[in-house]
């Protein structure tokens, strides 16, 4: 597929060969980029526009990586839905919808356009003021445990909920959300997370900190993030907590008397896909 012609420092007329596209909206954004929508936008140097953006990732004729930011969110959503269904879709945004052409990719891609040189970052040029352009975008480092890998782990749990839930049986010792954790004080970090979630209910956090998506029936999947932690939960079930302070650990939180009401309250303030 080929996308729109986009102005770049290297060539004003070079076509973009589209590889993929992602949404950057308060309800749907690559969580590897930040704990909330404003953080994800900041990682790309964008203003957190309320209606969001579409990110089109591709290569120019020299093979260089480029990310084209457009404000036609619906177009990108249709393209992604078509591709997910195995259908072809020629994503060719109108030039009037282009907000920015950014060198590099903010996400890791395992694909490349056929017939072009291997993907590589364009060489930074100079701005009209003579200053050096910023370096190309690059994916966050996920080789070691930290915020980016923690958020990716939460993404995986949300996608594979049934598989993770099957690992927790009736004999499992949960970390309790209340004042007396079943697993003892060693999981005081979970207590802190629960307290911060209550804080979100009382004073709504930045857009995207709490997101709600369809699960099944009346059930919703909740995703919440904060400084040093991520939570994935089902409104009719338990929650899983991931902490920066506990590399690779996934802590299941039992419903108890507190969690059901907290999840319902979070679902009411969560942003949802349109």
Image: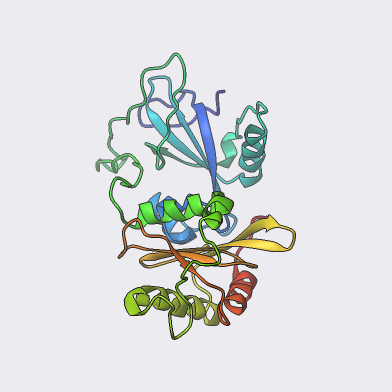
Q: Locate residue 228 relative to residue 212 in the image: left or right.
A: left
Q: Locate residue 217 relative to residue 29 in the image: left or right.
A: right
Residue 210 position (above or below residue 30): below
Say which quadrant the N terminus sits in: top right
Q: Residue at x 30, y 65 (%)?
A: 245
Q: Residue at x 55, y 57 (%)?
A: 165
Say which quadrant the C terminus sits in: bottom right
> Does the rendering let one see residue 250?
yes
Horizontal and vertical percent position of residue 144: 28, 49
Q: Locate residue 205 relative to residue 125 in the image: left or right.
A: right
Residue 135 position (above or below residue 220): above
Horizontal and vertical percent position of residue 231: 48, 64
Q: Quadrant of residue 248?
A: bottom left
Q: In front: 165, or 28?
A: 165
**How many numbered circles does the render carry?**
0
Q: Quadrant of residue 109?
A: top left
Residue 33 position (above or below residue 119): below
Q: Residue at x 48, y 83 (%)?
A: 178
Residue 186 position (above or below residue 246): below
Horizontal and vertical percent position of residue 257: 58, 82
Q: Residue at x 61, y 46 (%)?
A: 73
Horizontal and vertical percent position of residue 113: 46, 21
Which residue occupies the extreme right position in the image?
A: 217
């Amino acid at each position: 597929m080929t996308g729109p012609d986009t102005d770049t420092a290297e060539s004003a007329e070079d076509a973009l060969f589209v590889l993929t596209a992602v949404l950057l909206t308060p309800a749907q954004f690559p969580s590897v980029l930040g704990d909330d929508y404003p953080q994800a936008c900041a990682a790309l140097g964008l203003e957190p526009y309320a209606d969001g953006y579409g990110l089109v990732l591709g290569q120019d004729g020299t093979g260089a990586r480029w990310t084209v930011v457009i404000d036609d969110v619906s177009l990108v959503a249709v393209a992604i839905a078509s591709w997910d269904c195995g259908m072809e879709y020629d994503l060719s945004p109108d030039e009037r919808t282009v907000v920015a052409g950014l060198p590099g990719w903010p996400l890791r891609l395992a694909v490349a356009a056929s017939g072009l040189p291997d993907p590589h970052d364009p060489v930074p040029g100079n701005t009209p003021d003579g200053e050096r352009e910023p370096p190309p975008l690059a994916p966050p480092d996920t080789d070691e445990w930290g915020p980016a890998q923690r958020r990716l782990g939460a993404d995986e749990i949300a996608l594979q909920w049934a598989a993770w839930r099957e690992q927790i049986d009736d004999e499992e010792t949960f970390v309790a959300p209340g004042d007396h954790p079943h697993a003892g004080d060693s999981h005081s970090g979970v207590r802190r997370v629960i307290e911060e979630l209550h804080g979100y209910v009382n004073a709504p956090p930045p857009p995207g900190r709490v997101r709600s998506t369809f699960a099944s029936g009346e059930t919703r999947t909740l995703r919440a993030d904060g400084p040093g932690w991520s939570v994935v939960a089902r409104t009719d079930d338990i929650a899983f907590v991931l902490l920066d302070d506990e590399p690779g650990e996934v802590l299941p939180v039992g419903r108890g008397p507190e969690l059901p009401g907290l999840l319902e309250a979070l679902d009411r303030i969560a942003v949802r896909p349109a």
